[in-house]
Amino acid sequence: MEDLVIRDADVVDGSGADAYRADVVIDAGRIVSIVKEAAAAGCQRPRATREIDAEGLVLSPGFIDMHAHSDLALLRDPDHSAKAAQGVTLEVLGQDGLSYAPVDDRTLEEVRRAITGWNGYGDDIDFDWRSVGGYLDRLDRGIAVNAAYLIPQGTVRALVVGWEDRAATPAELDRMRQLVAEGLEQGAVGLSSGLTYTPGMYARDAELTELCRVVGSYGGYYCPHHRSYGAGALEAYAEMVALTREAGCPLHLAHATMNFGVNKGRAPELLALLDRALESGADITLDTYPYTPGCTTLAALLPSWASEGGPEEILARLTDPATAGRIRHDLEVTGSDGCHGVPVEWETIEISGVADPALGDFVGRTVREAADLRGEAPWDTARRLLVRDRLGTTILQHVGHEENVRAIMRHRAHTGGSDGILRGSKPHPRAYGTFPRYLGHYVRELGVLTLEECVAHLTSRPAARLRLPDRGLVREGYRADLVLFDPRTVAPGATFAEPRRLPTGIPYVLVDGRFVIEDGRRTDALPGRSVRRTPL
């Protein structure tokens, strides 16, 4: 007798094909048989130790979050309902060029400081690894959902070059290539960059191309947060397409949006650029989140020259009146490269979290609102926050366009990614709501995608990018990473006002055949492990 049979489910198998009714049998963490309704009518139905009546529910592969910032959250919070309750069974970590491996003692401290706003400083974490393999081994001790890892190019550059704005020497480039190769050999699935974040943004295209050659030779992919999502966005996308083509490396575009007023209605131009590249043989995918506002740190808006040298140098410049005046001019007049070349509009910058609880009154207000309450200029408020919070402040940036969001999610290369920052008093609701929002709002309510199309975007398409041979489809022999949801009620609970509410309509989620969500509640199971690169 098998472990589990899910009976009378409407199977949306992830391939894009029409749904069908079936009993799905699971044993030892894998799908061992699928008995379609027509076949079941004339034979004895499968039996198992446990049965679930799935009448009215859709059974699909578990969702793959192609852009997650759970690098420490998976270690800190065994519950991890933020993702498990959405039906996510695999997250891709190491995003935007900054994470916690490979490092030495110096670099680890610098990175912890630099991305406190993303993941917290990590006082509650035992950083007992330094290599990519060591981090993946740490995940293998047991986590809520599975996780893959991208080597963060900014961290590699910090380790070898430091935080200076200069070209790498030939010896430094050789060392970076070696570190990337080692990370891939240890199981990373590719390389990420944050080309509006220091120190990754200081890399010239020739340097990135050489690293991507290594990635391509191992069968990995390059995932850049490219140099602009505002002014010059199309040029920045084209730069990444050309760079990876020269390097012979697959490309996955991170949170592929077209933001700020300069890009309203311009998604078709981006999609035409990508279609031309795909038609000429390029290997390209992308991910998006189904919301218009973005989310980052307040410090990320600063110009690159002000961020050179790392966190302590940034704070020193902010406390010097003359230098702070130059920063303000770049932000408000010129258009900082950290703000994507667009002069900052303080009324669009909402404070979503602070590292120092004493600054909690700022959370939920825009910088302009907070400044008006204090009778001062918005820059003075922003500067005070940056210094007092030691760069740990996170923000929502309300600069997106709904028509662009809908157009991009329809594209044949599209996958889903939450870009979810789980820290802060008022995080972006995408951290808790991305996948049910796709299914509820954009499938059921708006019909932007069919259910079968949407499930394929969230399952088999990302599994193919990750080169996973036994995930992303409901197939015999595949791992039982599965989600059961009610297509009539599935919806995000998270809102901008209450961003940590869990979704509705997702009663069961299995990771490797074990329930992490059962009857709508989180179990204590920790079946997740690292998912490592499949060798060529």
Image (cartoon, rainbow, N blue to C red):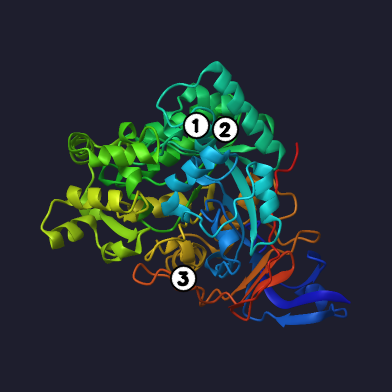
Amino acid type shown at disc 2: Ala
**Amino acid type of the residue that numbered disc 3 sits on in the rendered structure:** Pro
- Image-based side of 444 in relation to 221, left or right: left
* Alpha carbon separation for disc pair 3 and 2: 35 Å
Q: Secondary structure at mark 3?
A: loop
Discs 3, 2 touching: Cβ within 8 Å: no
Spatial CA distance of label 1 from label 2 is 8 Å
Q: Residues within 10 Å of mark 2 (few under 14, many from 20)?
A: some
Q: Are marks 1 and 2 in contact (CB under 8 Å)?
A: yes
Q: Position of residue 412 (x, y in %)?
A: 54, 47
Residue 315, image quadrant: top left
Estimate the spatial distance between the alpha carbons at disc 3 and disc 1, rounded to whole Å: 34 Å
The residue depicted at 36 percent of the width and 45 percent of the height is: 258
Q: Nearer the viewer, residue 360 or 282?
A: 360
Name the spot of residue 487 as percent of width and height, x first.
55, 73
Q: Point out which mark residue 282 bears.
A: 2
Q: Give the camera-side residue of 140 and 466.
A: 140
Which residue is the site of mark 1?
241
Rendered location of residue 358, percent (x, y): 31, 64
The amino acid at mark 1 is Val
Which quarter of the rendering shows the N terminus?
Answer: bottom right
> Which element carries disc 2, helix, strand or loop?
loop
Query: Which mark is drawn over residue 492?
Result: 3
Locate residue 72: give its quadrant. bottom right
Image x and y of residue 255, in percent = 46, 48
Judged from the image, the secondary structure of the residue bearing numbered disc 1 is: helix
Extreme left residue here? 375
Q: Can the viewer see residue 302 in this picture? A: no
**Label disc, if present, on residue 145 of the rendered structure:** none
